């Protein structure tokens, strides 16, 4: 009681106390605006990073809401106590914002597009008017952030003024910070907002009903990197993020290299016992691409970089800059690099420039700052125009898109975007996609763009991953040696009763697509390896999932009794329209080397681990410890330590799964 009286006496000595009516009006308006924003988020409003149509996630605890609740406390004593605390918080926050914002007060507002031609020498945010589309230049935002004194004064005397200042703070502080590259208010990273298309694992099929399996190869690795990031954070990844073929193909395998570029890859088949189901076998298909080291063609590259506000995070735009700088190290002096950025609209930061002018390219990268919305479609269109204007005949012409998420300005329909990219690939300009960050990543769109753009999709979560993708595997990422590569396996009903393809659910093709050269498929880069695994049930084994049919006749003895099946591959050489064919039988008694057997077993450990992360529907009494043991026993030389890292990830997954 004495404490309350002392507090009231103290407060009576303070001049200029807020009026109750004004305060109530201001706080009511602020709370209403806050609730409306939350309602828009939950209703799937079109904004960058929206999780719709994914599963809903709980909203994070809001610091702003907490302050509002403090200021609307039930008792007079609590209200005055909390208002004093809130005033202090506003003052500290105002000082923090003032220190972080640029001194010249220039900010990029989302309603004002980037100029198409951007002069990096003028500094971030100083984009001149003009350009091919005569896009308007930037102008400074009209309203600076309100000071702490202005906020406190308005809150004390005039509710309408407080509402106006609150609107100014939201618009200026949250939507207009492209130049500073720093969020004026801290953001809570929302887990689970990354969007992945759920797929159903390939089912077990009867050879008697469907003996032929056809699919397109896939060399993407984005899934593995994203899964690694989640596991390193101590949580299991969402199941839709796990694509088995990308997990397996993340690793280089020691398959023998082809010696003739006219047949750009070699194929190697290994048959081994299934470790997770006694009686079944695994047919392991390894493809190794020709290495063009020492004979690299010239490159015409366009870096298409997302500089929207959501890229304002250490693992996003700063990592993008570092990654692009790494790639420069692998290019020839006479190669060409251009830079296009997009936020509210698209702009050319750097016209095509020889790599020998490396410092000029690095300076243009260094000046980039994050701010604005995400006009990704406009960026893609501009990047293609720039790449086509500098097209190199008999060279590599490629756009490298680096982004954290989806596009919410311009063309935002995935089918329209992928259709545009698909038409453009006929010009000889290909598109690869590098994903960064989390909480906003639209994986399915990135995958579709890369697949239709004849490029690769990778996810870069660390500087080490950038080193792997853009330095150690640069030739495979940039230089295609075979396009539209398809695999078809016909299983022999005399020796195989059931089969299932592990992974490649998004790459399945109809049987008739195999011989149709108009059907697009995956590409193989220089030195790249590709792995595919089938699990089969031999005839006579009781390990199948189907019961014997009462009326269907037995398979008989059609085909050779010494063959499990027949493997066929179709591919095109770059620039050619007609495909070529490679074929070989899959014997029941395949002779293999100890090296190939070791590589097949490690790939099997990765495939089993991927299945465990998605539920392990087809695994029988096989767990993380088994995956760990199999991978450890077949780690091999492991030059870059990728396999040792995988072993640690298995351990982390086991711990996370037990929690």
Image (cartoon, rainbow, N blue to C red):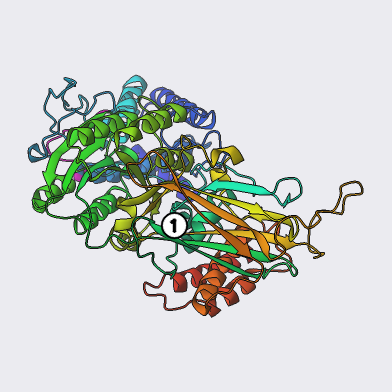
Task: Examine the rendered structure and indicate whether residue 603 appears above or below residue 595.
Answer: above
**Residue 460, picture quadrant:** bottom left
Q: Residue 103: x, y in percent?
A: 13, 40
Q: Residue 430: x, y in percent?
A: 32, 40
The residue beneath circle 1 is 225
Residue 31 vs residue 183, the one in the foreground: 183
User: Residue at point 72% right, 67% down?
Assistant: 277
Looking at the image, residue 649 sits to the left or right of residue 621; the answer is left
Residue 33 vs residue 269, the one in the foreground: 269
Is any part of residue 151 visible from this angle?
no
Q: Which residues are magenta?
A: 99-109
Whether residue 108 appears in magenta in the rendering, the answer is: yes
Looking at the image, residue 470 sits to the left or right of residue 531; the answer is left
User: Residue at point 45% right, 36% down?
Assistant: 68
Q: Where is the C terminus found, in terms of image quarters?
A: bottom right
Task: Examine the rendered structure and indicate whether residue 189 appears above or below residue 590.
Answer: above
Residue 231 vs residue 347, the one in the foreground: 347
Looking at the image, residue 546 sits to the left or right of residue 551; the answer is left
């Amino acid at each position: 009681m004495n404490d309350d009286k002392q507090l009231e006496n103290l407060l009576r000595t303070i001049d200029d106390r807020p009026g109750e009516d004004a305060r109530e009006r201001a706080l009511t308006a602020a709370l209403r605006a806050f609730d409306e924003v939350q309602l828009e988020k939950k209703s799937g409003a079109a904004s960058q990073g929206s999780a719709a149509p994914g599963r809903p996630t709980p909203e994070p605890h809001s610091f702003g809401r907490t302050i509002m609740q403090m200021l609307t406390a039930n008792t007079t004593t609590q209200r005055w106590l909390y208002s004093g605390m809130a005033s202090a918080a506003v003052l500290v926050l105002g000082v923090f914002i003032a220190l972080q914002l640029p001194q010249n007060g220039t900010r990029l507002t989302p309603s004002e597009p980037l100029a198409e031609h951007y002069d990096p020498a003028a500094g971030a945010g100083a984009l001149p008017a003009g350009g091919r589309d005569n896009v308007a230049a930037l102008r400074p935002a009209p309203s600076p952030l309100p000071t702490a004194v202005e906020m406190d004064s308005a809150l004390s005397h005039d509710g309408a003024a407080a509402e106006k200042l609150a609107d100014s703070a939201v618009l200026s502080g949250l939507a207009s910070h492209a130049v500073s590259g720093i969020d004026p208010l801290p953001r809570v990273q929302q887990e689970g907002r990354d969007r992945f298309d759920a797929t159903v694992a390939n089912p077990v099929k009867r050879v008697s009903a469907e003996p032929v399996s056809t699919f397109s190869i896939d060399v993407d690795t984005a899934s593995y990197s994203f899964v690694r990031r989640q596991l390193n954070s101590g949580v299991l990844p969402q199941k839709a993020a796990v694509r088995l073929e990308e997990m397996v193909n993340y690793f280089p395998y020691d398959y023998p290299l082809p010696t003739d570029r006219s047949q750009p890859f070699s194929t190697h088949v290994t048959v081994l016992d299934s470790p997770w189901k006694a009686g079944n076998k695994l047919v392991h298909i390894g493809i190794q691409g020709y290495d063009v080291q020492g004979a690299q063609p010239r490159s015409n590259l366009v870096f298409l970089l997302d500089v929207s506000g959501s890229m304002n995070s250490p693992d996003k735009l700063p990592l993008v800059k570092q990654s692009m700088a790494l790639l420069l190290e692998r290019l020839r002096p006479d190669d060409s690099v251009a830079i296009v950025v997009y936020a509210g609209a698209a702009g050319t930061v750097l016209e095509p420039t020889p790599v020998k002018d490396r410092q000029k390219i690095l300076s243009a990268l260094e000046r980039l700052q994050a701010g604005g919305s995400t006009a990704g479609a406009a960026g893609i269109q501009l990047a293609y125009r720039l790449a086509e204007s500098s097209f190199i005949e008999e060279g590599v012409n490629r756009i490298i898109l680096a982004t954290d998420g989806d596009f919410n300005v311009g063309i935002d329909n995935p089918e329209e975007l992928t259709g545009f990219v698909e038409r453009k690939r006929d010009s000889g300009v290909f598109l690869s996609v590098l994903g960064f960050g989390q909480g906003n990543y639209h994986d399915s769109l990135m995958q579709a763009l890369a697949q239709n753009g004849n490029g690769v999709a990778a996810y870069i979560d660390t500087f080490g991953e950038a080193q792997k993708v853009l330095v150690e595997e640069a030739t495979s990422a940039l230089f295609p040696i075979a396009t539209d590569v398809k695999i078809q396996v016909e299983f022999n009903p005399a020796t195989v009763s059931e089969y299932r393809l592990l992974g490649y659910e998004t790459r399945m093709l109809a049987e008739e697509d195999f011989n149709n050269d108009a059907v697009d498929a995956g590409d193989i880069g220089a030195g790249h390896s590709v792995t595919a695994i089938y699990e089969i049930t031999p005839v006579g084994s009781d390990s199948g999932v189907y019961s014997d049919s009462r009326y269907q006749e037995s398979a008989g003895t059609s085909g050779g009794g010494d063959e499990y099946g027949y493997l066929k591959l179709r591919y095109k050489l770059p620039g050619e329209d007609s495909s070529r064919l490679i074929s070989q039988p899959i014997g029941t008694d395949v002779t293999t080397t100890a090296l190939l057997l070791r590589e097949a077993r490690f790939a099997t450990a990765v495939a089993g681990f991927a299945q465990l992360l998605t539920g392990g529907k087809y695994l029988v009494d096989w767990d993380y410890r088994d995956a760990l043991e199999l991978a450890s026993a077949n780690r091999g030389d492991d030059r870059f330590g990728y396999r040792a890292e995988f072993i640690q990830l298995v351990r982390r997954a086991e711990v996370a799964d037990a929690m």
